[in-house]
Amino acid sequence: MRLIPLVFTIALVWALNHKWGSLPALGMLLSPQHGCWQHADPLAMETEEQLVIPGLKGPAQVWFDERMVAHVFAAQEQDAYFIQGYLHAKNRLWQMELQTYAAGGRLCEILGPGLLQYDRRKRREGMVYAAEKAVSAMEADPVSKMQGDAYTAGVNAYIRQLRPRQYPLEYKLLGYAPEPWSNLKTALLIKYMSYDLASSADDLEYTNARQLYGKADFDRMYPDFTDQQAPIIPAGTPFPAPSARAAPPPDSLLGDIYKVQTAVQDRDKGSNNWAVSGSKTRSGAPILCNDPHLELGLPSLFYEMQIKTPDMNVYGVSLPGAPGIIIGFNDHIGWGLTNGYMDVLDFYRMNFRNGKKEYRFNDAWRPASLRVEEIRIRGQQPYLDTVAYTVWGPVLYDNTFPDLKSHEGFLAMRWTAHDASNELLSIYRLNHARNYNDYLKAMALWNCPAQNFVFAGKDAGDIAIWHNGHHPLRWKDQGKFVMPGSDSTYAWQGFIPQVENPHSYNPVEGFVSSANQAATDSTFPYHMFGYYDLFRGMRIKEQLSAMQGITPEDMMTLQKDNKNRLAEAALPFLSQYMNAAGLTAQQRKYWKTMFAWDAVSAPESKGATLFLLWWEQLEKQIWDDDLVRDSIALVRPLEKTTLFWLMRDSAMHFVDNVNTPQRETLQDVVQTAFQLAADSAAVLDKAGKLPLGKFRGTDIRHLSRSLPALSRMGLNTGGGRHIINATKKTTGPSWRMVVELGKETRAWGIYPGGQSGNPGSRYYDNMVDDWMDGKYYSLRLYDERKSSDGIVQKIFFTPGT
């Protein structure tokens, strides 16, 4: 009988240290010596700490302010990047590694077979292939090699000193250990950013629509330019004659109807930036503003910090996993980014023989480069997937992926992110820039993702914006449709020369701005197309044009502006087609609420929710009977396109429902859409969920997407699509920044999270409530030789052996 407790204890220990299905191994998690108890913040913090770290070249120090923002002071830049890597790892190690696992198609290793198709897709998109080329470019330059090597060494210095009991909580939950960092992992993070911001492509959907609806309707459904415009470079700006041209082939050869859909992405996350010259500000100094709207998560996307060396004093936000400051300011300039949303990914239809060994190209059979991808799967044998590489790039879709019966053949990718580039060096140059010419040198290196780089300089008071990146040199409509991969005449014919990218320098308007809208009007001599918003950029230009004596507080107010310009334009037009007498008493109540709405999407607004419900139903009534058919890949036109087409032609034939015998008019669909919206609103109203902040709200989810206790859910937020405050369900301003570049730089900012990635830390989500309430923090540049008021901790780094 004495053996029973022993056997039970052995069984319990074994059970607690093994995963059961999706449940973590709880032994490590619950261990008093190693478990979750290790992650609680200590009540008292050491005000000073001495660290001896092998790998440093000289002494350095880090000051932490009351929000735990790190201020790094180093005599050598190599040490500054080493310490940045060390701090990123100390505060965000699991986040850094998870992102590289996701980018490299390795999630099955830690999360099991449920993510096999995701991992296969990432391998087939050539993410590691692209990162390898980026590492080659990075390590070919002595500056970016120093930067990358020092950063990697700092990350690994922190990892080496970890003991299992000190692993971040998520490693214990998922039952695995961190692995050494490398420059490849940094490059993977950069390519993950490229995927998020520059992998949109509707080639398959557009190919289908062009064949199903003809050229005239296709051009109306997916126009390059809409009736109203507010381009980044003001309409009517003269452009010089192009130095290069792309010659089209005689026939576009559309080919098949496709049922496999390209990846669905949110193409309007909503970033904004602008700079106003001193002629429009109260202080006479330029003011620069940026609020990139990206996927929100905990730990937060960004890590805030200052880095000061003898040659650089820069403040802003960094990406955990990469060296440098990606958005911010230094002693001389400020800069900010918004996504360009350029289409820089094309698909080519391939003809293979002998499996994947050879493909047809220019009337000959050419050997493919076969890359065998070993995908390790937790608890199972590895999965081997062979990816064929062609002159265009990797074959994403073939007879084995995705697992469909449509037999749609082989489709290869041509993507600018696969080209060798050195974005790290571009950021390095921005961090060190002193004037507009230095900024231009940084722009010359940026490849992908295409970004709108706004600039303001202190010394000369310059402002500028460049729509920057490698833009393929294509003929009109090239890249909208799947092209024949057997013919080299369908290749890109180079790139638009970087110096000819759209840009504006000290314009007469006294400001520059971007909000993911088209870079130019139709007079730009090169063919560029993408997935552009309109109304946010229009609202920003209207407001800045009317403003004088601008203060930083005015800019903060503008960043939080909730006016819905789509609704403001649509409501007067659509109301002409409403018959209020045909509504029920309950529906009329909601019609009155909407009619009285001021188009401001505040958290408490019921009108904002009613408009969203109405517009969604209207789009369904107009488009779904035509675009939802037999699993064929199709995509709705953009909302601005639908509205302007209806304004131009209220009898446009897509209004009629092809599935009904009667002919519907615009009045019919507007009326029906509102009745459905009002009925939905009544249900929401009864549940107390009709105000926008209750109906939609915002969720800041833990990066695992499966741990609500480590998330901030149901935040009461306003804003939304087509609104300067583009906050939505899971996306929003991931960093708000306002910088006044006067004699003494003044800056303010906030992001929705905290500096720590440890859920047990008081600095995990300490800024979320203030972010939700629209508050800003003063961003203070410290000098290690002067006052340290507001500093709560100092760490002194000493080289070790």
Image: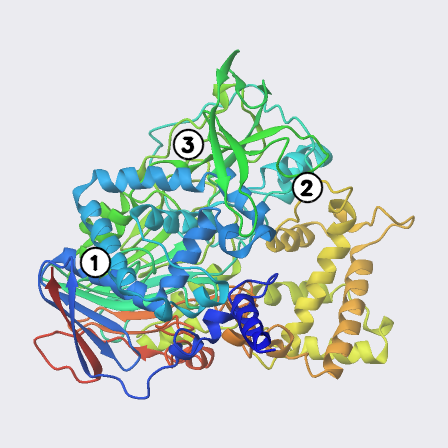
Q: Earlier in the sequence, mark 2 or mark 3?
A: 3
Q: Earlier in the sequence, mark 3 or mark 1?
A: 1
Rendered residue at 62%/76% (across/down): 692
Provide residue 236's location: percent of width, then percent of height.
41, 47
Residue drawn at the location 30% of the way across and 49% of the way down: 182
Q: What residue is disc 3 on? A: 473
**Mark 1 vs mark 2, CA separation in Å:** 46 Å
Q: Residue at x 54, y 35 (%)?
A: 385
Q: Circle 2 — which element?
A: loop
Residue 601, x across and y down, in percent: 57, 74
Which residue lies under the disc numbered 1?
81
How many labels, in total? 3
**First along the sequence among labels 1 and 2:** 1
Residue 8 image label: none
Residue at the spot 77% in from the left edge and 62% down from the top edge: 670
Q: Quadrant of the N terminus?
A: bottom right
Please provide percent x and percent y for residue 111.
Answer: 53, 56
Tell whether label 2 touches label 1 (CB within 8 Å).
Answer: no
Circle 3 crowding by C-alpha within 10 Å: few under 14, some 14–19, many from 20: many
Can you give x and y, in whole percent of width and height, for residue 784 in the image?
Answer: 11, 74
Foreground: 496 or 223? 496
Q: Amino acid at mark 1?
A: Tyr
Q: CA distance from mark 3 to mark 1?
A: 37 Å
Dots 3 and 1: beta carbons under 8 Å? no
Three-letter code for the amino acid on which mark 2 is drawn: Ala
Q: In the image shown, does 578 or 341 lie closer to the viewer?
A: 341
Q: Closer to the observer: label 3 or label 1?
A: 1
Residue beneath label 2, please?
Answer: 633
Say whether residue 456 is visible.
yes
